[in-house]
């Protein structure tokens, strides 16, 4: 009987021994992009100087009103935090930092070359 328990104990301890962990799995390769798809994400209008929103206004007051309307139509309620003037490649830009209703901030670029100084 003692031998039975000794064999049972040996079998139990061998079966409880830690098995080697499985090798780490490799993440699946990304799917190829469809033909004709652009690899770069689209740039949001007004998010960079290169993608500045073109303001179609004849005077400064009309241009400022146009900018405010554009911001409201695209982002809802907002508060202007800063307004700066910048130039790039012969263009005049308004660089406006706004605080949105969710308290996030956005920096927006407007091309004001058409009405700058008028």
Image (cartoon, rainbow, N blue to C red):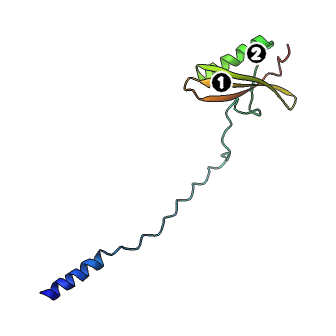
Residue pictured at 67% horizontal, 47% vertical: 39
Q: Secondary structure at mark 1?
A: strand
Measured as percent of width and height from the top left, residue 73 is found at 62, 20
**Cα–Cα span, label 2 and label 1:** 17 Å
Disc 2: which residue:
63
Measured as percent of width and height from the top left, residue 98 is found at 65, 24
> Viewer-proximal residue, 102 or 109?
102
Disc 1: which residue:
98
> Viewer-proximal residue, 15 or 9?
9
In this picture, residue 44 sits left or right of residue 55: left
Measured as percent of width and height from the top left, residue 70 is found at 67, 20
User: Compared to 1, does 77 lie above or below?
Assistant: above
Q: Quadrant of the C terminus?
A: top right
Residue pictured at 52% horizontal, 60% vertical: 27
Question: Can you tell which quarter of the image residue 38 is in?
Answer: top right
Residue pictured at 65% horizontal, 29% vertical: 106
In this picture, residue 16 sits left or right of residue 63: left
Mark with earlier residue (2, 1): 2
Question: Can you tell which quarter of the image residue 12 is in?
Answer: bottom left
List the single residue furthest toward the right: 90
């Amino acid at each position: 009987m003692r031998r039975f328990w000794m064999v049972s104990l040996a079998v139990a301890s061998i079966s409880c021994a830690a098995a080697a962990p499985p090798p780490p799995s490799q993440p699946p390769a990304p799917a190829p992009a469809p033909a004709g798809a652009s690899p770069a994400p689209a740039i949001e209008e007004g998010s960079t100087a290169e993608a500045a929103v073109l303001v179609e206004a004849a005077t400064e007051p009309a241009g400022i009103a146009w900018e405010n309307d554009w911001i409201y139509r695209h982002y809802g309620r907002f508060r202007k935090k800063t307004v700066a003037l910048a130039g790039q490649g012969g263009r005049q830009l308004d660089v406006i930092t706004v605080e949105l209703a969710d308290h996030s901030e956005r920096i927006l670029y407007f091309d004001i070359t058409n009405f700058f100084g008028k």
